[in-house]
Amino acid sequence: MFRFANPARFMRFSAAILPWCAGATALLLAAGLVLALFVSPPDYQQGEAVRIMYVHVPAAYLASLAYAVVAVASAVSLIWRHPLADIAAQEAAPLGAGFTLICLISGSLWGEPMWGTWWVWDARLTSVLVLFFLYLGYIALVHAFDDPTRGARAGAILALVGVVNLPIIKFSVDWWSTLHQPESIFRLGGPTIAAAMLWPLAVMALGFTLFFVTLLLVRMRSRLLAAKIRALRLVG
Amino acid sequence: MSGFLRLVRRDLRLALRQGGDAAMVLAFFLLTVALFPFGVGPEPEVLRRIAAGTVWVTALLAALLSLERLFLADYEDGSLEALVLMPLPLEIQVLAKALAHWLTTGLPLTVVAPLLALLLHLDRSGYGALVIGMALGTPTLSLIGAVGAALTLGARRGGVLLSLLVLPLYIPVLIFGVGAVEAQIIGVSARPHLLLLVALLLAAIPLAPVAAAAALRQAVE
Amino acid sequence: MADETRAAFAGSDLACRRGERLIFAGLDFALPARGVLLLRGPNGSGKSSLLRLMAGLSPPEAGVISWNGDGIFDDAGAHRARLHFIGHSDAIKPTLNVLETLSFWAEMRGSGAAVPAALTHFRLSRLALLPCRFLSAGERKRLALARLIASPATLWLLDEPTTSLDAAGTEDLLRAITAHRAAGGRVVIASHGPLSLENAMTLALDDYTPRARAIAA
């Protein structure tokens, strides 16, 4: 399980796959953008504005995926006290927060032509907003201690607390939203999507995922290298 | 007397002697609620519409005020280290301290809430759901808050950080608490909302102490 | 107690890390019943850290501390019940009085029956009803040490226990330690100052300080 968990081995492994990840990311995002902007049809209701979906939905998906990465890495760090897991969790969190922000902003941009307002307290958007707050709390907590080990531990516990709470928050926000918006309004990224839109969406989602993996590897490598430099300074 | 009750009694005694904590929380509650008429205007119709939400949101903030002190004093004077080394499991101790916090914060807030709802012209039928909801919801706030307080021990800007961590987790309690009052007012049963508040409490009682105890152990490590 | 005097309290191949710094490594100790172990070494050599490892407050980076062959984390509750740890901070609340403070800590460990004896031993009886905010530094230290007698525990872990104690206070502490040893107890003391204790073993922590390899890979 920990074949790549040794920092030196991780450096070798990540150096080997990083160019492939970066290359595939560039290809997929380029192809996805062409598909999304030119090939896929405009929506009969929403017109060209539907194309925002090709950024919004993958960003929403990555916002959750990144939180899952943070949570799993945190669990590994708490159970096996593995330093690499700490680094993975801490480096994934700002990326997740970034995707969450992209999701919120694109949702707001999409909402303007749809609802005539920049923000609607729609159940999905509200849940994403709360997720954004959870990311912010995690990042702030990790950096709030003079001793980085304490920050890492506290952050790991918080990430797991967040995992338990996220479904509860999601459920309560959905509940709240149905209480206050009984009229069925248009939901962003609703479940019915035409096949012609599904393909570009899948390509974009895969591109976003690889983009996340690439960035995560780069960030983890920088962290390890920075630690090495610090160690050499201490010895020298 | 069990160690659990001893710890509750000691925390209550400290709260009474140090004095003012509970009174301060109530004063904050009252003052903040009293700000709303200045913000939205004194028309009874407007106030009635926002009464339940205002009382609940303000109660959340008030409960947050005294949270920072929950473990901080013990952490700073070495008591926490000694408590961690007591035979009584740390999870039970967290439960005891959360109970003491609720008795000095959540309970007074619950008692005063109808008074503040009166100032905001809350519909007469909503009072029962407000008080029952707060009695069921505020213990959950103390428990979740205990996790946040334990996590931020020794952190820079602990107080602000604590609010950032805890407030998003308070959202479900707020939703069901306000939902209960509004359901009652429009003549629907408040039961589902209240039962959901009970469910939250029943989940928090075993889970929050585990997380808080883990955080406390790493804080004294 | 008869069973406990035969138990072995020992640590083997212990290492301790603070942040990225390895403080000591390859450290062994064994402490029989009636024994005293003095931890010596300059600042930063890890005396307090070793005491905290012994208390089970933090896990060692490497190695095992065991009581009668079982690691102390195997049954953490039993280990907590058998030890007193008196650290730098004295766990005293300014608004509680001396008697309330001592009774609370003793009762949390089971029984406050020995509280009067503990107050007498450390000459605190006269101050029993005084709120702790009026205590001097030396009196606070005596109150913290009185926890040792107020509830029984076989293993005493003391971090700089003579700080701010006067000659009489130190004498009280030494008498308590002597009585504790006679009853089969064990004591570990981290201390800079000289302490006149019979047959005390000494552990010099700077012998275990790693040099160039002090850094994480």
Image (cartoon, coloured by chain):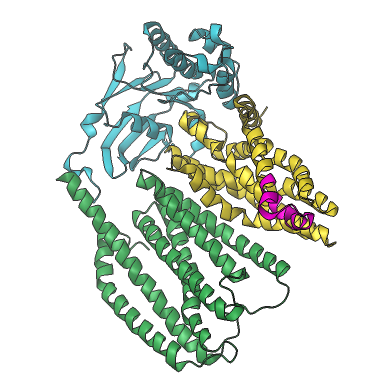
Chain colours: A green, B yellow, C cyan
Most frequent secondary structure within the magenta stretch: helix
Tell me: residue A56, above or below residue A51. Answer: above
Could you tell me which residue is drawn at 52 percent across and 20 percent down? C152
Figure label count: 0
Left or right relative to A55: residue C45 = left
Whether residue C123 is visible to the viewer of this picture, yes or no, is: yes
Could you tell me which residue is drawn at 40 percent across and 65 percent down? A95
Could you tell me which residue is drawn at 22 percent across and 54 percent down? A228
Left or right relative to B127: residue A128 = left
Is residue C171 covered in magenta?
Answer: no
Left or right relative to A175: residue B67 = left
Residue at the limit of the structure toward the left, as seen here: A236
Left or right relative to A217: residue C112 = right
Tell me: residue A167, above or below residue C182. Answer: below
Q: Position of residue C190 (x, y in %)?
A: 33, 23
The quadrant where residue A98 appears: bottom left
- Residue in the foreground of this view, choosing between C51 and B67: B67
Q: Position of residue B26 (x, y in %)?
A: 67, 38
- Residue in the foreground of this view, choosing between C174 and B219: B219
Q: Position of residue B93 (x, y in %)?
A: 59, 36
For the record, the magenta segment spans: B34-55
Whether residue B195 is visible to the viewer of this picture, yes or no, is: no
Q: Position of residue C157 (x, y in %)?
A: 41, 25
- Residue in the foreground of this view, choosing between B181 and B155: B181
- Residue in the foreground of this view, choosing between C182 and B151: B151
